[in-house]
Image (tube, rainbow, N blue to C red):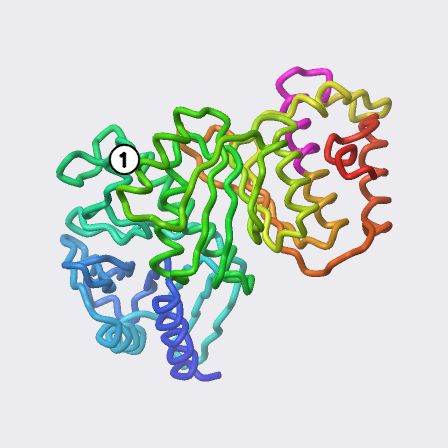
Amino acid sequence: MSGTDNIALLTQYLYKSFEINTLIKAVLSKKRSQATDLNNVFIRPVVVKGEVMLSFVYRHATKDLTRNLSLDQAGSEFDRLLKEHFFNADLFTSEADFSLLCNKRGNSKLLKKAATSTEIPLFTHDKIKLRFIQPENNIYLRELGILTAGFKVKNDMQDKFRQINKYVEIIDGILKNTAESNGLSVVDMGSGKGYLTFALYDYLKNNKSENIRVTGVEVRPDLVEKCNKIAGEAGFKGLKFTEGTIENAILPEFNMLIALHACDTATDEAIYRGIKAKAPVIVCAPCCHKQIRKQMKPDNILKEITRHGILQERQAEMLTDTLRALIMEAFGYKTRVFEFIATEHTPKNVLIAGISKITLTKPNQEVLERIYQLKAHFGIEQHYLEKLLNI
């Protein structure tokens, strides 16, 4: 393609990534003329007076200038800058990175690479934020202690508020790969104080469908009572909290199971209940990995890892969650294991997400063989989830 064609194509990628909320930033570089003092242009999404725009920062030799443009304006300016001022451009999105390389002869290459970052930042401008969960008139966040009486995020709750928004963003991304958004029934096993349970219901009700039911399961009766009271005050008719353990709670019919930071084998009990119920979606953030760590006794070179306590602990975490993901795959789930969020509130930040792709009457033997081989390398007799599923 010619330089003009590739510029047009990259501009289309800019439009698309902005519209579907995957745009992270763009950088224009390698100026066409050394006579100008404009060295680079940096582009990122911002929110100005409630409107999402693109901020262009023009970096000159001695000063920076900023313009905030609508999408249409930004596309024209992006195209103009590349044709008149710069040879190269890098576009970073959460799905892929794109690099445009042009030269003085009019030749160009447009390269697509794996995304260097999959995390969309919260867009900020003059302290205005674009969020999945809004603080304005948010009764449940006020009652849960995240907001002041005037519905402002408390200074010591900024990290928690970011965690809530990141969590909702992740769940929204998972649901985009399913057909379960309408008529969704969610059970949140071990809902605790309810921060994330309330936020998920709020987002699903307002952005997916009114026909949403969320049930928080919590063993502490005082938290169940408090959360049900707040749900009533917020007018959340489809949200309720019930007392029970992950293992024994009486659950309604559900098509999505969530268990965040269930300790040790409680994560396996949650996955087991999701698999037995044939839930289309299972999402877990594991915590503690004692069951496998106690069994690990490799008689091969891997013992060099397990002889150091801290390395043994980290290996046990990776091995436990790898086996969990494989067991889910054996029962027809397509799994992803990725970072949840790294904050002081979530020291265990791995998330296992499974989406059911095929209904199996019995586990896939090929996957079970891979599980067996992996266990054999580490001297593992049985993973607790295997025991629950009788495999």
Q: Would residue 109 appear left or right of 20 to someone viewing this image?
A: right
Comparing 377 with 106, the one in front is: 377
Q: Would residue 213 appear left or right of 352 to someone viewing this image?
A: left
Is the magenta region chiefly helix, strand or loop?
Answer: helix
- Splitting the image into 4 quarters, where does residue 11 fall? bottom left
Q: Which residues are magenta?
A: 306-321
Taking 77 as reference, is 363 above or below it?
above
Pointer 1: what residue?
158
**Where residue 222 appears, x then y in whole percent?**
39, 24
> Within 10 Å of the Cα at label 1, are there few (<14), some (14-19), or many (20+) other Cα atoms?
few
Residue at image x 33%, y 52%? Answer: 132
**Where residue 325 appears, x then y in whole percent?**
68, 43
Taking 153 as reference, is 44 above or below it?
below
Does the magenta-highlighted stretch encompass residue 76?
no
Residue 117 seen in this snapshot: no
**Where residue 275 appears, x then y in whole percent?**
68, 46
Q: Would residue 332 appear left or right of 119 to someone viewing this image?
A: right
- Splitting the image into 4 quarters, where does residue 25 fall? bottom left
Residue at image x 33%, y 60%? Answer: 27
Taking 336 as reference, is 347 above or below it?
above
Does the magenta-highlighted stretch encompass residue 316?
yes
What amino acid type is highlighted by mark number 1?
A: Gln
Comparing 169 with 319, the one in front is: 169
Residue at image x 27%, y 54%? Answer: 130
**Where residue 37 appears, x then y in whole percent?**
19, 62
